[in-house]
Image (spheres, rainbow, N blue to C red):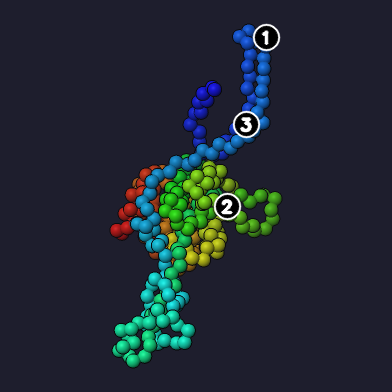
Amino acid sequence: TEPLVIPPLPRGVVRVGPVTTVRSDPVGLLRREHAFDDVHDLFVHPRTVVLPSTSAGLVRDLEGSATRRLVDADMSFHAIREYVPGDSRRQVHWKSTAKTGRLMVRQYEESRRSRMAVVLAAATPEYADADEYELAVSAAASLGLRAVRDARDIDIVTGSEIPRVVKGRLRAIRHVPVVSPRAMLDGFSGLDRHDNTMAVEDVCRLASEANERLSIAFVVVGSAVPLARLRQAALAFPADTAVAAVICDERAHPRMQSVAGLTVLTIGTLDDLSGLLVRGATA
């Protein structure tokens, strides 16, 4: 076997193969070649950082949220009402029954498993340069990796390239697979900016339409996206969805602010993200 030294590669998907091995004598009179037709994809993952668990900080509400739908058995207690035929006897509240002289039962609010969304802006004009986009990819991948490792329901979406030959308004988004940490990072390896793609506000709108029970959404953008557009993107989500925008600006100092109910995290390096998320727990 021959050692193969691979220099550090930028994030992406590198196609390896087909490969041809060549053997020859010292003077070059004889030569033997053997071709291998196999082609393999080498995934160069984005840099990620360890984030606090999604059960703490800004995403601490992901254990499941109570809805307005009333059911006979669940975790979130709502009220006590009078028994009606068909109610389970196990839900009888005997203390209230003794006080009123009538059978009284417990009623609950239905709890649904919450879902998290990560939206990554993909339009070239939404970033100052390629390095800023790489920071955004790393931030989105770090958020997704933490959620996948915590076994959370998560949807990661970004804008997809729209062919220039298409006439009219076409909506196209790309979903990053989340079945496992490796599959997710492989998906991030193949992402790129596009000149002809949807604005981040439209991507948020499609992400919201595809997920009815979002608890929290992270919108990761570059420094070229103004706050007015971020507020517009936040309006695409339901009113009970907590929205946090992550602005990637390598020239900025890390800070967290609240703008009209929207939490805005500004990071200059990837390591800033972890500290800001922890700070959100006590904000």
Residue at image position (32%, 58%) is 281
Query: In which quadrant of the rendered image does the C terminus lie?
Result: bottom left
User: Which label's residue is closer to the chain start, 1 or 3?
Assistant: 3
Q: Which mark is residue 29?
A: 1
* Label 3 element class: loop
- Which of labels 2 and 1 is toward the front? 1
Instruction: Identify whether 211 is placed above or below 109.
Output: above
Observer able to see residue 122: yes
Residue type marked 1? Leu
Residue type marked 2? Arg
Alpha-carbon neighbours of circle 2 within 10 Å: few (<14), some, or many (≥20)? Answer: some
Q: Quadrant of residue 190?
A: top right
Q: Which mark is residue 109?
A: none
Q: Position of residue 193 (x, y in %)?
A: 55, 46
Q: Which residue is mark 3?
A: 17
Alpha-carbon neighbours of circle 1 within 10 Å: few (<14), some, or many (≥20)? Answer: few
Foreground of the two, 65 or 172: 65
Q: Which residue is mark 2?
A: 174
Residue at image position (44%, 61%) is 216
Instruction: Identify whether 36 is placed above or below 46.
Output: above
Query: In which quadrant of the rendered image does the N terminus lie?
Result: top right
View extreme (bottom): residue: 101
Instruction: Identify whether 18 is placed above or below 32.
Output: below
Q: CA distance from mark 2 to mark 1?
A: 54 Å
View extreme (top): residue: 27
Q: Position of residue 191 (x, y in %)?
A: 55, 45
Residue at image position (45%, 67%) is 112
Residue type marked 3? Gly
* Label 1 element class: loop
Q: Position of residue 247 (x, y in %)?
A: 43, 51
* Label 2 element class: strand
Q: Position of residue 13 (x, y in %)?
A: 56, 39
